Amino acid sequence: MCIPTSENPNSYFGYVIQTPRALHYLLDGAKIVSIENKDDISAVGSDGKLIVVEQIKDKDTTFSNCSEDFWCTFANWINRYKENKDKFTNRTQFIIFSNRKQPLTTGYFIDICNNAQNDEESKKCIETIKNNFSSTNSKIKKCFEVFIDKQNEAIVVNIIRNFSYKVPNIGIYEDVKNKIQELHSENRDIEAFKTKMFGWVNEKIYDKEKAKIRRFDLLQKDFRNYLDNNKNLKLALIDDVSEFDIEQTHRQYFYRQLGLIEREEELKRLDCRDYYRWLITRTKEEEKGKFSKKEFDDMYRTIYEKWLDDKEYLFSIHKAESDINKGRILYNNSITNNDIKIGNTPFDDNHKEVARGVCNFLANNNPETQNYNIGWHPDYKRLLNEENND
């Protein structure tokens, strides 16, 4: 068996090129992404089987017919397949990923392997290689013997059929950054989020004491938990909320509540703006389907329970205040709530705008949030019902 080049990688080189490829497969949803295990990178699906085994190459020269990179990689794949048959399937992908975007030369062994699409073409590919192989290099000759061994034929056919040679579209880091941008565009500071994501992978796979990449399994479950705890949703901070939109909110129940506590007109305009923004944000997040109805309900319940506790406490210590002032104190206390989040996902640095929008949404007497209705003036229900009757 060839000694794989990934067994003792240059620490900095491995650190640089394995991180983005590991992150690529985590973003694709692989259940487990392993570093320096079955290969440089290997990805496991929900059935526990290998989706991908990948060798990452960084070389200036093309993959000739006598390339040790080509022959050692194939020999290693064949031997590992034999040793771990239960981990591989007929769909496991075998990839050589060239960091330098090195083009293939037409007719070279790696090129004809890359073009084989089925078992018949794979068998023809094997025959072509057998008939044209020529090398005096003892290591390559040993790998070739593994390749042509009759006992390995079915495995070699399967590997060639599922083999592909890949290069970055732009660059190894740029491609993954674009993938993050595409999948997580809702993050308000997407650049900081990208940096954090790379940092999480780096911290997992880099052994600081030994100063090298370590064999490590990155779990999709841990990755998702990390994302949920570190990404920041952005409120729909649109600047073009029209006068018509704001005027429409003047008819809403929450707006009449603000009138009962004599909130200033300039501040009520902000209330209407952020109420409208929350409606947009909520609709967008529901359409994406990333959060369940339960997660939204849990958020509303948390806000409702905090409002209930605050109401009991604040009204008791401000007994001498008028009902209008009590309502103002309760309202201002509610919209400074910095703990508003959906599931484990917080909002970024616009907590007050979010809280203002969500609190006014819950104060709007909506049928879907009737279990979490909140209010400001101590006597708002009776007063607003009288106004409605009038």
Image: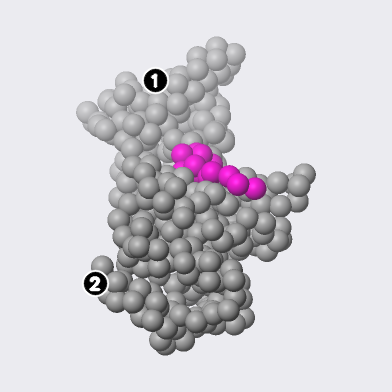
Q: Is residue 36 left or right of residue 384?
A: right
The front one of 102 and 260 is 102
Closer to the camera: disc 2 or disc 1? 2
Q: Which residues are magenta?
A: 214-226
* Vertical order, 152 against 359 (above or below): below
Residue that appears at 45% across and 28% down? 303
Where in the figure is residue 308, as x and y percent of width and height?
Answer: 46, 19
Q: From where the camera sits, is residue 54 visible? A: no
Q: Secondary structure at mark 1?
A: loop
Q: From where the camera sits, is residue 371 visible? A: yes
Where in the figure is residue 229, as x and y percent of width and height?
Answer: 53, 40
Residue that appears at 46% across and 86% down? 105
Image quarter (top left, top right, bottom left or bottom right) of the N terminus: bottom right
Q: Secondary structure at mark 2?
A: helix
Q: What amino acid is found at the position of numbered circle 2 in the picture?
A: Glu
* Vertical order, 122 against 390 (above or below): below
The numbered disc on residue 379 is: 1
Q: How is the image coloured?
A: one colour
* Vertical order, 385 against 67 (above or below): above
Question: Dot 1, how many residues are within 10 Å of its Cα: few (below 14), some (14-19), or many (20+)?
Answer: few
**Residue at the spot of label 2:** 120
The numbered disc on residue 82 is: none
The mark nearer the N terminus, 2 or 1, is 2
Q: What amino acid is found at the position of numbered circle 1 in the picture?
A: Asp
Image quarter (top left, top right, bottom left or bottom right) of the C terminus: top left
Residue that appears at 76% across and 47% down? 210
Q: Quadrant of residue 305?
A: top left
The front one of 116 and 165 is 116
Where in the figure is residue 343, as x and y percent of width and height?
Answer: 44, 35
Q: Is residue 155 left or right of residue 319?
A: left
Where in the figure is residue 185, as x and y percent of width and height?
Answer: 46, 58
